[in-house]
Image: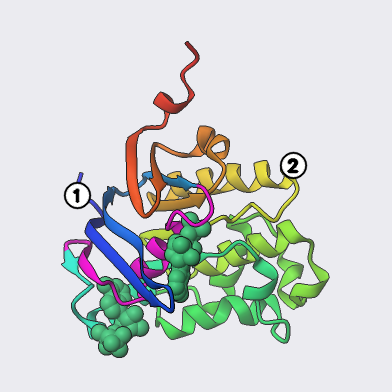
């Protein structure tokens, strides 16, 4: 299966007052459609820097980022055109990523409009469809983020990511701020949606145990490098 994302020898260095920080140092991995790669490591190991560079928020210091075979590290133009639709991100804190002055309907309508999706049923129907995908009631369209619980907000952030029909979603600690019971519910939903849409996930977390049910492969990051990458079951085998 062709990879949706191929990262080759990615480097991201920051110059700081204390010198150069090699936040990401020769990191390589790929993700195929329908696959979850868990990127696991302690705080400061470089996970978020990988995510932000892949998302185009940072200019890489070296290496290649191939998205569906196209090198997106080279061209800002290509990045904009291809990535804004195809590549979405869900952050740890849904509260800060949802505009408090917009209704859920507006939050979900915006990405559909921006990407001029080829939806035949109209925007309202499309919004209803993505809400039902994350199992939120249609009446939530009228609500504002503040009236929702933490897990519900995160479901809206996931729905917004799905609104452009992406092929890859970066999940940056998407459940770390939530209660354990809600965590499980969201993971379960993410798996269902992935199977339905054949989505790739890059799932970033400091919590290896969270990867047990969702990751197909796990990459362990340490000091800016991937020190191990293997099928998930290898990390959970009982001797
Ligand atoms: P993680 O997501 O695994 O916690 P980060 O990617 O946030 O790790 O950080 C990796 C390393 O890069 C850390 O040493 C961090 O201090 C450093 N770093 C991250 N972002 C910046 C930045 N904008 N400027 C300077 N150093 C940074
Ligand atoms: P600069 O950061 O010097 O303005 P560009 O004009 O090439 O460089 O990039 C503009 C934007 O595109 C920046 O926000 C940058 O982070 C982003 N970008 C550059 N390289 C990549 C890449 N490999 N993947 C995604 N986005 C990128």
The residue carrying mark 1 is 2
The residue carrying mark 2 is 181
Instruction: Based on the picture, tell me whether residue 197 belongs to the magenta stretch.
Output: no
Q: Quadrant of residue 215?
A: top left
How far across and how far down the image is residue 188, in percent?
Answer: 59, 42
Pointer 1: residues within 10 angstroms few (<14), some, or many (20+)?
few
**Number of numbered discs on residues:** 2
| Gap in angstroms between the C-alphas marked 2 and 1 | 35 Å
Q: Nearer the viewer, mark 2 or mark 1?
A: 2
Q: Tell me the magenta residue range.
A: 42-69
Dot 1 falls on a residue whose secondary structure is loop
Q: Residue at x 72, y 56 (%)?
A: 151
Instruction: Based on the picture, tell me whether residue 68 belongs to the magenta stretch.
Output: yes
Q: Is residue 45 visible?
A: yes
How far across and how far down the image is residue 3, in percent?
Answer: 23, 51
How far across and how far down the image is residue 213, in percent?
Answer: 53, 34
Q: Residue at x 45, y 53 (%)?
A: 45
Q: Quadrant of the N terminus?
A: top left
- Image side of residue 57 versus residue 186, left or right: left
């Amino acid at each position: 299966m062709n990879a949706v994302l191929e990262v080759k020898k990615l480097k991201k260095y920051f110059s700081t007052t204390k010198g150069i920080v090699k936040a990401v140092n020769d990191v390589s991995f790929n993700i195929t459609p329908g696959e979850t790669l868990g990127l696991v490591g302690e705080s400061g190991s470089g996970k978020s820097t990988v995510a932000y560079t892949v998302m185009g928020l940072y200019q890489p210091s070296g290496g290649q980022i191939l998205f569906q075979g196209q090198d997106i590290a080279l061209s800002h133009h290509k990045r904009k055109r291809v990535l804004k639709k195809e590549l979405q991100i869900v952050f740890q804190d849904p509260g800060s990523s949802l505009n408090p002055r917009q209704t859920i309907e507006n939050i979900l309508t915006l990405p559909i409009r921006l990407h001029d999706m080829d939806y035949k049923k109209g925007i309202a129907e499309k919004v209803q469809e993505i809400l039902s995908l994350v199992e939120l009631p249609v009446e939530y369209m009228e609500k504002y983020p503040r009236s929702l619980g933490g897990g519900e907000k995160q479901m809206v952030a996931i729905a917004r990511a799905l609104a452009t029909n992406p092929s890859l979603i970066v999940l940056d600690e998407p459940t770390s701020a939530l209660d354990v019971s809600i965590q499980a519910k969201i993971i379960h939903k993410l798996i269902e949606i992935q199977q339905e849409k054949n989505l790739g996930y890059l799932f970033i977390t400091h919590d290896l145990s969270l990867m047990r049910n969702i990751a197909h492969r796990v990459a362990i990051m340490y000091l800016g490098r991937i020190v191990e990458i293997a099928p998930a079951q290898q990390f959970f085998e009982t001797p």
